[in-house]
Amino acid sequence: MGDPFDTAGLRRRVLAAWADSPARFREDANAEEDLVRGGYRDRLLVELAQNAADAAVRAGVPGRLRLELVDVGGGAEVLHAANTGAPLDAAGVTGLATLRASAKRDAVRSVGRSVVSSGPQHQTIGRFGVGFAAVLAVSDEPAVHSTAGGVRFSAAHTRAEVADLPALAAELAHRDGAVPVLRLPWPADGPPPAGYATEVVLPLRAGSRAAVRAALEQLEAELLLALPGLAEVEVVVDGTARLLSCAAEPPLARVRDGERTTTWRLATRSGELPAALLADRPVEERARRGYTVTWAVPLDDDGRPVPPAGRRVLHAPTPSDEPLSLPARLIAPFPLGPDRRHVAPGPVADALVAVAADTYADLVPALAGDPAVLALVPRIGLAAAELDAALGSAVLDRLRAAAWLPAADPDDDARQPPARAAVLDDDREERVAVLAGVLPGLLPAGWSRRDGAPALAALGVRRLGPAAVAEAVAGISRPPEWWARLYAALDGADREELGALPVPLADGRTAAGPAGVLLPADDLPVTRLGPLHLRVADPAAVAPPAARRLLERLGARPATAAVVLTDPAVRAAVEESVDAVEEGWDDGDPAALAEAVLALVTAAGTVPGELPWLAELALPDADGAWAPAGELLLPGAPLAAVLGDGALGTLDPDFAAQHDPAALRAAGVLAEFALVRAEDPDDLDVDAADEWADAVVDRLPPGAPPPPWPPLTAVRDLELVADWSRALPLLAALPEQAWADVVLHGVPVPGYLRWWLGTHPVLDGRRPDRLCAPGSRELRGLYDPATGPAAVLERLRLPATVDDVLADADTAMDLLERLGDPARAVPAPVLRTVYAHLAAALDGVDVDPPARVRVAPDRVADPAREAVVVLDAPWLQPLTDALLVPAGGAPGPVADLLDLPLAGERVRAEVTSTPVRRLPWAAVPGADLAAARLGVPELTGEVAVHEPLLAGGRAVPWWPGEAVDCVDGSPAALGRALAWRAGAWPLRQALAEAFAEPARSADLAAEDAVR
């Protein structure tokens, strides 16, 4: 076997050095062990790829690396790593076998050719020749085959050589046979695979096979970003190949892993560090002043940056353990410490931090078309380590100073620095779109998302809430449609912040805030409302439902014509209009005001009497003056024909012809009698309202508390009527509520209209309450029947019974007088009880006694000239010589009412005769039937029979007593005496019958049983 690299000489010199100085052996063993267990413990594939890249760069060819795990039987596996590029040479073998003495040092000023056409040249990456030590982590017998020859290393052979050196026996024993494997090379046979210049062959140690297999399966294609000299890596495991490649087309690089391709955006800066910065670096580093710094970030299918997968660490240029928080891959030749894991601080690191920050500031603006770039902005306070903190701070400084943020205004292509930029609290597209060009520096909608807020805060971008928006739009001039878009876009915003949001009004003014602004409905005649000076929003500004919804939340009020018509400002303008005309109307035109109000009335569909205050609206009359609408008649109105001359004015005929009669009537102009409504009689502005209220209260039971009044309806202008024959049909045609009773404490009483008409001479000059209903039987002879149209008489509800008359104290007193009128007659059934009913109806009323009283249906008496009494004891009737007034069962109240004595007060008598017999009432023939008719089991007490019965010197039929009743023996006397004793005076005739025909008691009882 040949030895083209003189490995024998290398072994001889090393062994001689070890033999001469066992400490040198110990030093080499410790150094190799530190590399294997420390800086290169898990970097096998990275180091193989790095060596392949360096070989390709030195040869100026596209780098290819093939990593294949081969099963050689018996459970053993071998890793083959074949690469293109410069083959192994003697200097390379020396570098492999010499710690920290790389053969690449002498080539540091010469760089290889890029694999990209016309691309930049690349320096080799290895620096100290120690990376190959990573193979010892998995293999004790590594070999390198190349087109120029091969070498191998062997732990077993090295151990044997060392064992032959007596000076090293103790050290070898102390190390349990562990030796520095890479210090003694041997020649190796075998060429690399076809198409490759070099192959590293690693028979795997039994304990490392699973780790190598896992590392091959997890090898990332992104590693190639840090190795520009390496175009592709083929990974073969269990016969299955996976191709990793990187095709760079700056500023993009397409990294392929099998069928998956990821596009990366690159930003690169190259240069040379001043020599003074490297003064404190190791000698072999000082000549390596050139640098290339690259930032790379993966892009999604839409070209937006996404966080790279895997650990975020510095690649210097291959992965280190230096953590970075920025979501991009930094590839830069930062100086590493002895552990090859972390950056060594110092001037070089500081200078490269500045270059990296500048490069990052190139990368971010290039991606600034999408808000996803905000993920690349460093977060304050989230640095992962000292280098990361320095890098983040430097990057922020540059991003804050650069003009790279886009504007929301589509007409503005200029980029702006963060200090001039602003975002909205809400990221809705429509909100940003409407404010673009209004808010300086406003970023597009996507930039307002909450996930970007920390980045924007770190950059110093202002975040504008609704209050700032409201302040910014104050005073600007925009068409109503723009305001509509703004309101719709702000729908859902915090209403506490939008109190000062301007609102354009229909009359050209602008409201300083939405509170109280009227939002016009479709029926609102906006163009005709100017004279009212209302704050009505421009309809176009509030057309979208979302715009109306927002403004309503902020205090604006939906404004239908009905709502606006009841606005306090409209009412005030109406109520002050007549005074304004009289005072000269300095700031308006009464005709314009009338037009505006009538337009509202028409649109609202207001009915007459619905808004009584409309009657105060100043309208032109036929004489050229202005008067309240409620004091004007429509030309040709039916009401005009029934009122007295000049009672009311007439609306100007030309004005009337130009307007809807229904609107004019709703505004109070009179065509027929007008209704007046109120909640209390004191508020009824009609004739004699107080008198009606008193009459109503008089009808309530004595002692009743003041009544709660229901809604009241009255009719005005009754006192102005001159022609009642034509007025009454007009009144009869009024709505039911005009004629309805008022119910107080459950007592129905006449409403105002019926009361007023009933107490005034409206029926052929006579008061309706002094007439009776046609066909009345009870009142015939006492009252004249009313005549007139049936509809009118039905509405007036004329009295038909005594109870109808007695319902009112005034008509009851009139009836009392009528009873004493000799020209009138009274039906006998009425006379029996009428005075008793009058006494009850007028109880508590201060009434003068009548001059005459009725003692018979066709006769009256003058108590001043004739003896008249009220019969209170029926047994006295034969003894009195005075005329009798029927008491109807209430002799005392009737006597008080008529100021007459009772018969019992005038007649003084007692029984003077002696009874011929005395017996119990139960023993009287017919007593059983009498008891049955009284509803008692048996009659009690006694009765004395006189023949004749004398009292006061005269014969009388019966006389009551406390224990014994006296009778003359006649059935009539027996019936009256028993009825009075039993308190059943109305049954006196039935009881007399029982005593008159005792033999027919059974027949009479049978009759009683019939119902």
Image (tube, rainbow, N blue to C red):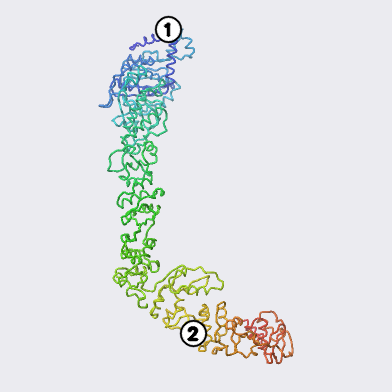
Of badges 1 and 2, nearer the viewer stands 2
Q: Secondary structure at mark 1?
A: helix
Q: Which residue in the structure is indicated by mark 1?
A: 20
Residue 27: x percent and y percent? 43, 13
| Residue in front for this viewpoint, 564 or 588 | 588
- Asked whether disc 1 touches disc 2, contact meaning CB atoms under 8 Å apart, the reply is no
| Picture layout, residue 307 above or below residue 16 | below
**Neighbours of disc 1 within 10 Å: few (<14), some (14-19), many (20+):** few
| Residue in front for this viewpoint, 663 or 883 | 883
**Looking at numbered disc 2 in the image, what kind of residue is underneath it?**
Tyr
| Picture layout, residue 285 above or below residue 902 | above
Q: Which residue in the structure is indicated by mark 2?
A: 783
Q: Secondary structure at mark 2?
A: loop
Residue 843: x percent and y percent? 57, 78
State left or right for residue 630 relative to residue 174: left
Q: Find the distance from the CA under tag 1 to the CA under tag 2.
A: 161 Å
Residue 796 quadrant: bottom left
**Neighbours of disc 2 within 10 Å: few (<14), some (14-19), many (20+):** many
* Residue located farthest toward the front when viewing the structure as drawn: 583
**Looking at numbered disc 1 in the image, what kind of residue is underneath it?**
Asp
| Picture layout, residue 825 above or below residue 280 | below
| Residue in front for this viewpoint, 825 or 428 | 825
Residue 8 quadrant: top left
Q: Quadrant of the N terminus?
A: top left
| Residue in front for this viewpoint, 1003 or 237 | 1003
Q: Quadrant of the C terminus?
A: bottom right
Residue 561: x percent and y percent? 36, 61
Residue 154: x percent and y percent? 41, 15
